[in-house]
């Protein structure tokens, strides 16, 4: 009985650890992302950089595509907007892997706010599922059709 109980406890602990396991990795050399780094990227959808007090990935600032918000809450604030035609630069690519949510990919950029503060922000890239910030919906449909 004690052996069975100990086995159940160990299996439960292993399951719990596997659920909360996560890793962060630099993938800037990955060919899927390296061509996007350190080159000017023209924004093709209005987007907003948002500060989030509780961001758990890489940066407290996140670039949100198709968003034109003016949030000014205690934990979340809109700090900069990109209009269609604006240019942004990404300097790194990262992956966030968790057994709970799978593997996600982020591009890391840097920009200056109106108050002169230099910030770094993350942009979630899901290139297989939806248009990216640098492509129109028609360009996305053409890319995924190939």
Image (cartoon, rainbow, N blue to C red):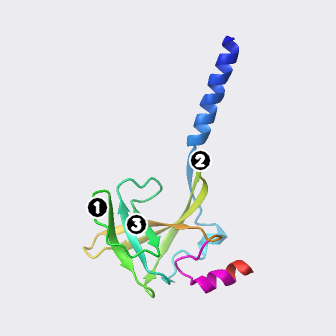
For marks 3 and 1, the one nearer the N-term is: 1
Using residue 2 as the reference point, say whether residue 46 is left or right of it: left
Is 139 within the magenta? Answer: yes
Nearest the viewer among 107 and 4 is 4
Residue under numbered circle 3: 120
Asked where in the image residue 84 lies, by quadrant, the reply is bottom left
Relative height, residue 8 to residue 26 (above, below): above
The picture places residue 135, in percent across and down from the top left corner, at 57, 82
Quadrant in the picture for the C terminus = bottom right
Report the Cα–Cα distance between label 3 and label 2: 26 Å
- For the point 54% across and 81% down, the residue is 134
Magenta residues (range): 130-142
Residue under numbered circle 1: 73
- For the point 70% across and 77% down, the residue is 144
For marks 2 and 1, the one nearer the N-term is: 1
Residue under numbered circle 2: 100
Nearest the viewer among 85 and 39 is 85
The residue mark sitting in front, 3 or 2, is 2
Nearest the viewer among 100 and 42 is 100
């Amino acid at each position: 009985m004690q052996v069975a109980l100990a086995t159940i406890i160990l299996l439960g602990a292993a399951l719990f650890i596997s659920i909360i396991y996560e890793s962060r990795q630099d993938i800037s050399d990955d060919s899927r992302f390296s061509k996007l780094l350190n080159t000017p990227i023209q924004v093709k959808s209005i987007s907003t950089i948002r500060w989030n007090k509780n961001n758990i990935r890489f940066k407290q600032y996140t670039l949100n595509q198709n968003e034109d918000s003016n949030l000014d809450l205690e934990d979340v604030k809109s700090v900069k907007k990109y209009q269609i035609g604006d240019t942004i630069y990404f300097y790194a690519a990262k992956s966030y892997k968790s057994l709970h949510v799978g593997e996600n990919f982020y591009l890391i950029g840097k920009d200056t706010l109106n108050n002169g503060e230099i910030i770094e922000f993350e942009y979630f890239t899901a290139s297989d599922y939806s248009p990216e910030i640098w492509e129109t919906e028609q360009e996305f449909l053409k890319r995924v059709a190939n």
